[in-house]
Image: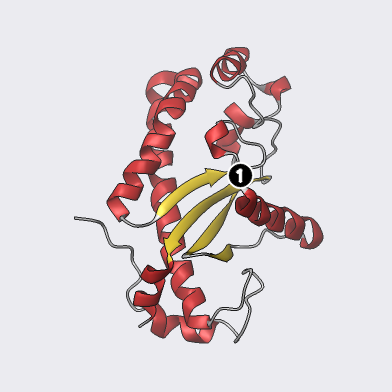
């Protein structure tokens, strides 16, 4: 049985949360009710993926150390993404960034638009927007931005302060790696949640 995301009651709660018309965090005009439903579906799915990835990483760090954890991420991150998709059903997930490690996470043109929106807004306002929504043909895309946490620096920090064995393993597994040189609080990238338009329409009935 597919796991249903926790969106019960979102319509009633959400109407009052947005002014009419285009949200400042969307690329098109959407009714307030629809924005709220997309947000709830997107946030629930993104949090599910983050929870599973963090659990796997924490266990790998504990049992195999940083070098072993890189190997686990190399083999398991995409598998976990597919497993969460299978558990949810209909919704597709992807982690993406301009400074990607795995080439499969390279942004397409729509994802690049969202990443640019986050970067530009952060630069202009000093604050990272909480989300971004795109309306595409047949689907909505919800983006949850990610910040670099202290634990991330073990594998994504300044190479000058990283363990040489960690760096060697990264170079071995990801010869074209772009995902280093971060500081705590930096914008890392986003989780993209693709939701079929029909799913949102049904939830808004």
Q: Residue furthest left?
A: 1
* Nearer to me, 134 or 149: 134
Instruction: Count all numbered tags in the image, as a single digit.
Output: 1
Where does the C terminus fall, quadrant-wise?
bottom left
The answer to which quarter of the image holds residue 6 is bottom left
The answer to which quarter of the image holds residue 161 is top right
The residue that appears at 44% across and 73% down in the rendered structure is 37
Q: Residue furthest front?
A: 137
* Nearer to me, 38 or 198: 198
Where does the N terminus fall, quadrant-wise?
bottom left
Image coordinates of residue 142 in percent, x first then y, are: 52, 61
Q: Is residue 63 above or below residue 198?
A: above
Q: Is residue 107 above or below residue 67?
A: below
Image coordinates of residue 8 in percent, x first then y, are: 32, 74
Image coordinates of residue 130 in percent, x first then y, are: 60, 62
The answer to which quarter of the image holds residue 144 is bottom right
The residue that appears at 45% across and 19% down in the rendered structure is 68
Decide if residue 1 is on the left or right side of residue 101: left
Image coordinates of residue 175 in percent, x first then y, are: 62, 19
Q: Is residue 53 above or below residue 71?
A: below
The residue that appears at 57% across and 32% down in the rendered structure is 103
Residue 47, visible in the rendered structure: no
Residue under label 1: 107
């Amino acid at each position: 049985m597919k796991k249903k995301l926790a969106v019960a009651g979102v319509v009633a709660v959400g109407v009052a949360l947005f002014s009419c018309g285009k949200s400042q965090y969307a690329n098109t005009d959407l009714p307030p009710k629809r924005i709220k439903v997309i947000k709830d579906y997107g946030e629930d799915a993104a949090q599910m993926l983050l929870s599973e990835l963090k659990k796997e990483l924490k266990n790998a760090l504990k049992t195999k150390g940083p070098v072993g954890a890189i190997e686990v991420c190399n083999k398991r991150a995409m598998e976990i993404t597919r497993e969460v998709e299978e558990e949810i059903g209909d919704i597709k997930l992807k982690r993406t960034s301009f400074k990607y490690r795995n080439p499969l996470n390279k942004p397409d043109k729509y994802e690049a638009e969202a990443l640019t929106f986050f970067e530009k807004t952060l630069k202009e306002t000093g604050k990272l927007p909480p989300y971004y929504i795109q309306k595409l043909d047949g689907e909505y895309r919800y983006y949850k931005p990610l910040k670099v946490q202290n634990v991330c620096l073990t594998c994504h920090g300044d190479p000058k302060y990283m363990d040489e064995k960690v760096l060697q393993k990264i170079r071995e597994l990801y010869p074209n790696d772009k995902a280093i040189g971060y500081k705590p609080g930096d914008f890392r990238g986003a989780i993209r949640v693709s939701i079929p338009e029909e799913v949102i329409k049904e939830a808004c009935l």
